[in-house]
Amino acid sequence: MSRRLPHILFVSGSPADRRTISACLAAHQFATTAIGRGRNALHELETNTVDAVVLDVANDDGSGLEACRRLREKGVLVPIILFTGSGDPIDRVIGLELGADDCIEKPVDEKELVARIRARLRIIDRGHQAADTYSFAGLRLNVKERRVTRPNGSSLRLTSAEFDLLAAFVARAGRKLSRSQLLDLMDRRTTDDAARSIDVLVSRLRRKLLAETDGGLISTIRNGGYQFTSDVNSIRGANAGA
């Protein structure tokens, strides 16, 4: 199966910039969704797998700074790169204080933009690779061994699909994940039948987790999607096999 291209959400009030930046990112092997309104960014993030947001201070419904603030208040954790006005450091300072990970002055150098996006994604990748094991609700999930173990060391029996679903949940605990996002994270094709199968998998996984823990760990989100609600700890290095 071919590897999924990193998906970049680009928000800008300039149709010309949306065309130019989308073409640039496509040429460098990024999938891109370009929209004009900051208020629509959260919907895109909740319904699609987005790896980074590139946010212009100027968009169709107000300041990109306000859009950045709203996204962080809603719990969005993906990297946000902000396009700021040329020569004015105030937007950069405010943007970083509101939760932007990086700022680039306009006019934007396309090579610099691609380099900065890749740098941010490398940071995320290193974080994911470092966490081989997660603990939650008295259970331990080992990504490399594809095992979930109880405190006594015995293994919880899960199908391959159930394990992939649980691994997607625990690595993104607290995030609202749509069915299509879960399919992407499980590296499965997005079809109507596949999306419906997520509901069946969630139901089976819930029953197995409920038998092992004090309460439900997966909440259903209104208008579609799920959220893993347990506290999750990442275990790295020598402690991962303990």
Image: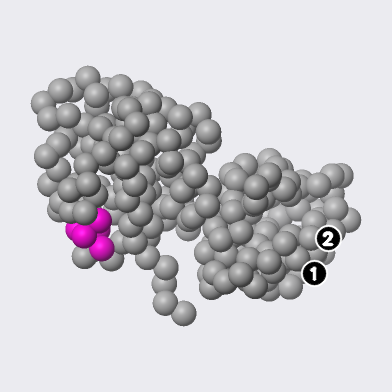
Q: Amino acid at mark 2?
A: Lys
Q: Position of residue 77 (x, y in %)?
A: 47, 41
Q: Which mark is residue 157?
A: 1
Give neighbour class at mark 1: few <14, some 14-19, many 20+ (Cα, 10 Å): few
91 left or right, relative to 175? left
Q: Which residue is mark 2?
A: 208
Examine the rendering and report whether any part of residue 150 can be seen. no
Q: Which mark is residue 62?
A: none
Residues shaded magenta: 22-26
Q: Is residue 25 magenta?
A: yes
10 left or right, relative to 213? left
Predominant SS of the magenta segment: helix
Q: Is residue 211 magenta?
A: no
**Viewer-side residue, 59 vs 89:** 59
Task: Spot the residue most to the bottom.
Answer: 1
| Residue name at image x 38 percent, y 36 percent | 38
Q: Position of residue 40 (x, y in %)?
A: 43, 41
Q: Quadrant of the C terminus?
A: bottom right
Q: Amino acid at mark 1?
A: Arg
